[in-house]
Amino acid sequence: MSDIDGMGTERATCWLAPNPSAMTLDGTNTWVIGEPGAEEVVVIDPGPKDGVHLRRVVDAITAQGRRVGQVLLTHGHPDHSAGAKKFAELAAAAASGGAGGAGGAGGRGGSGVPVRALDPRHRLGDEGLAEGDVIITGGLELRVMETPGHSNDSLTFWLPADRAVLTGDTVLGYGTTVLEGRLGDYLSSLDRLRRFSEDVEAATILPGHGPKLDDPIGALDHYITHRRERLAQVEAAVEAGARTAKEVVARVYADVDKSLWPAAEWSVQSQLDYLNERS
């Protein structure tokens, strides 16, 4: 395990999923968050459907004499959400003293653990998440912000007690994120997070991949600058004759490993759509 496993703040601890790749960096960061001494915790992004990882997190929570109150998703991409239902079942079984995953399959019914997300397709139970929601579990407070761009259903969570911003894939620990959603939305989300982080004097960003960032303003300034520079490069490529996302990638990402070009095309297409909207 890398140094990422076990990092965090007083209330948030990262459990790194064993799914490293060019797209997931070191792997998916599963966040276990709870007030010191509280019996109930929140888990953000259980990760892929990897039984060893899911059980490792549940067992660690149980060994501390704690239980999972609810599961939250920053967004629905499989590397963050595919293991959520199984995790909820394991957590419910552990809370009821069972060894299997039968308890909790029906959401909040009985000893069930709900899975909450912006997109109803990724929920388990009746409770979703939306802009302005405040989650209180075991005395812990989390606030929900909608930050579309990486995906249309991307959320950010604010943990005021630790002055920590949990950004999912909107801001990564290193590198830049791929865009599936609209670039205009993403730029607005970054600008909003920049203003918000300054207003609340955020101390750290806890991302969905990569190490935590203890200079939130600097990290967000870098992201905003990089996106606007890339947009200018894409615009220049179009003016030079590139017409498709693939043609733009060949010009703008010439110094990037070609294995990443297909993913880069998603972001470039978002940029081309953005330029067309402005023209």
Image (cartoon, grey):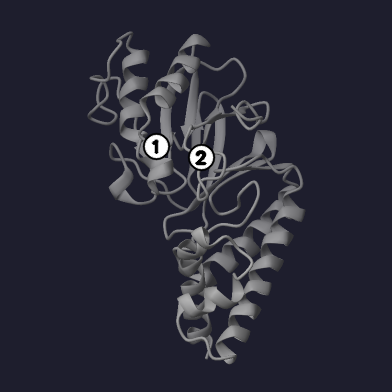
Q: Are marks 2 and 1 in contact (CB under 8 Å)?
A: no
Tell me, yes or no, if residue 262 can be seen here.
yes
Looking at the image, is 35 positioned above or below residue 162?
A: above
The residue where tag 1 is placed is 48
In this rendering, which labeled residue sits more in front, label 2 or label 1? 2
What's under tag 1, amino acid-wise? Pro
Number of residues whose C-alpha sits closer than 10 Å to that of mark 1, classed few (under 14), some (14–19) or many (20 or more): many
The number of numbered badges drawn on the structure is 2
Q: As drawn, is 17 to the left or to the right of 120?
A: right
Of residue 246 and residue 35, the one placed in the foreground of this image is 246
- Mark earlier in primary sequence (2, 1): 2
Tell me, yes or no, if residue 195 can be seen here.
no
Q: Residue at x 53, y 63 (%)?
A: 258
Residue at disc 1, secondary structure: loop
What's under tag 2, amino acid-wise? Pro
Q: Any mark on residue 97, and which?
A: none
Number of residues whose C-alpha sits closer than 10 Å to that of mark 2, classed few (under 14), some (14–19) or many (20 or more): few
Q: Residue at x 61, y 76 (%)?
A: 231
Of residue 34 and residue 167, the one placed in the foreground of this image is 167
Q: As drawn, is 40 to the left or to the right of 188?
A: left
Looking at the image, is 150 positioned above or below residue 205?
A: below
The quarter of the displayed image where residue 212 is located: top right
Q: Residue at x 47, y 79 (%)?
A: 273
Measured from the top left, where is residue 112 in percent x and y?
A: 30, 24
Indicate the quadrant containing the N terminus: top left, top right, bottom left or bottom right: top right
Measured from the top left, where is residue 18 in percent x and y?
A: 48, 32
Looking at the image, is 38 positioned above or below residue 267?
A: above
Measured from the top left, where is residue 33 in percent x and y?
A: 55, 29
The residue where tag 2 is placed is 20
Give the CA separation, mark 2 to mark 1: 11 Å
Residue at disc 2, secondary structure: loop
